[in-house]
């Protein structure tokens, strides 16, 4: 029996309330010839049992339970390590794919000779598919995606289909990134891969309090995503990359150093200024270095960003006086 040309890679960690719906949205695709690799990343809520039952019913599922939680990047690398298919589609255990997602993405990737293809997506509330919210649109053309990536992530990770060879050549996911591991990977692939996004929403992304990028993890997610972007600019200037576990003070100093270098490209400077403003709003840091970073942001940013930052600092001081 020949190997399928497509694999779907899902990592699951304590997502029992959603896992059955997520798996069914893949198993019931209009394109049916694929291998479904599900890595259980040390779940303790019964997700493992749900996956095992599904695997017993459908031979396309290849179940890989990990003994302990290793993090999303490490779990995805483990899944990629056993994958033989040419194309790999990502999926999360709490989202829902549209029925024709895989068929449309694989056809478009082949026609356009892309390495990474995402799509627009719908925001979905809580436990119900009925509570669909607005569509998040993303740039569709390679040039626009690459230009905007240093500013912010432009590719929805669980909606991605990618060429396994391109991911392998980039070194796979960096397991040090406990969050924003996809953003780090896309930035490292700039210059070696072709990107795209389909304009139609092919994924319903569930918004719930336990999601890894939710409000409870805002500071950590901001730290990791800014580290990914700062490392992109440090690679460009020939400087060593930061370990994602670096302190907030080290990361702030790294942004100050990059801002002091200046840039011939206004877009790069704008990206750094925006990340620095995000850092000030969301990441606890030594007040002295944070004040220096804020001064640099105010001197380099446009009017709208200066107003936002000054308003944030005013509200922050008011809150501290009230406490």
Image (cartoon, rainbow, N blue to C red):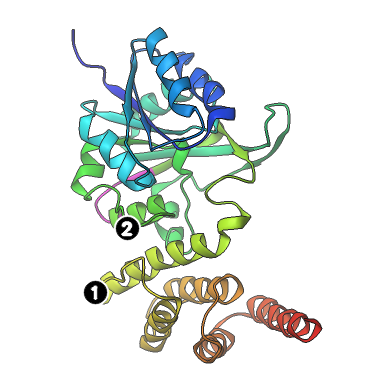
Q: On screen, 19 above or below 122?
A: above
**Foreground residue among 151 and 290:** 290
* Circle 2 crowding by C-alpha within 10 Å: few under 14, some 14–19, many from 20: some
State which mark lies toward you, 1 or 2: 2
Q: Secondary structure at mark 1?
A: loop
Q: On screen, 59 above or below 68?
A: above
Q: Quadrant of the C terminus?
A: bottom right
Which residue is located at x 70 percent, y 78 percent? Answer: 312
Q: Which residues are magenta?
A: 190-195
Q: Main secondary structure of the magenta part?
A: loop
- Residue 36: image x %, image y %? 35, 22
Label 1 or label 2, whichever comes before in sequence order: 2
Quote the CA–CA distance across marks 1 and 2.
Answer: 16 Å
Which residue is located at x 41 percent, y 84 percent? Answer: 253
Q: Is 194 inside the magenta-drawn segment?
A: yes
- Residue 73: image x %, image y %? 34, 47
Which residue is located at x 45 percent, y 43 percent? Answer: 157
**Tag 2 residue:** 176
Q: Secondary structure at mark 2?
A: loop
Q: Quadrant of the N terminus?
A: top left
Q: Is 287 inside the magenta-drawn segment?
A: no
Left or right: 102 as drawn, with respect to 16: left
Q: Is residue 55 visible in this depiction of the protein?
A: yes
Left or right: 229 as drawn, with respect to 95: left
**Tag 1 residue:** 240
């Amino acid at each position: 029996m020949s190997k399928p040309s497509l694999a779907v890679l899902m990592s699951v960690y304590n997502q029992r309330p959603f896992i059955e719906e997520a798996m069914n949205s893949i198993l019931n695709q209009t394109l049916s010839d694929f291998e479904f690799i599900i890595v259980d990343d040390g779940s303790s809520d019964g997700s493992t049992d749900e996956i095992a039952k599904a695997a017993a019913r459908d031979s396309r599922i290849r179940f890989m339970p990990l003994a302990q939680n290793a993090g999303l990047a490490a779990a995805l690398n483990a899944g990629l390590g056993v994958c033989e298919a040419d194309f790999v589609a990502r999926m999360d255990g709490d989202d829902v794919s549209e029925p024709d997602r895989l068929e449309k993405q694989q056809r478009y990737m082949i026609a356009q000779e892309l390495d990474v293809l995402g799509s627009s997506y719908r925001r979905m509330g809580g436990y119900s598919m009925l509570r669909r919210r607005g569509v998040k649109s993303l740039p569709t053309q390679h040039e626009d995606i690459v230009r905007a990536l240093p500013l912010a992530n432009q590719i929805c990770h669980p909606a991605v289909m990618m060429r396994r060879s391109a991911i392998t050549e980039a070194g796979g996911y960096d397991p040090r990134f406990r969050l924003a591991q996809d953003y780090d990977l896309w930035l490292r692939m700039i210059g070696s891969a072709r990107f795209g996004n389909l304009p139609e929403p092919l994924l319903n992304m569930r918004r719930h309090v336990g999601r890894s990028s939710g409000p409870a993890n805002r500071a950590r997610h901001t730290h990791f995503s800014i580290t990914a972007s700062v490392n992109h600019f440090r690679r460009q200037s020939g400087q060593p990359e930061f370990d994602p576990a670096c302190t907030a003070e080290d990361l702030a100093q790294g942004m100050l150093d990059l801002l002091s270098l200046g840039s011939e490209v206004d877009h790069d400077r704008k990206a750094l200024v925006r990340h620095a403003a995000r850092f000030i709003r969301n990441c606890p840091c030594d007040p002295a270095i944070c004040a220096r970073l804020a001064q640099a942001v105010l001197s380099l940013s446009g009017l709208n960003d200066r107003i936002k930052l000054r308003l944030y600092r005013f509200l922050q001081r008011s809150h501290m006086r009230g406490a």
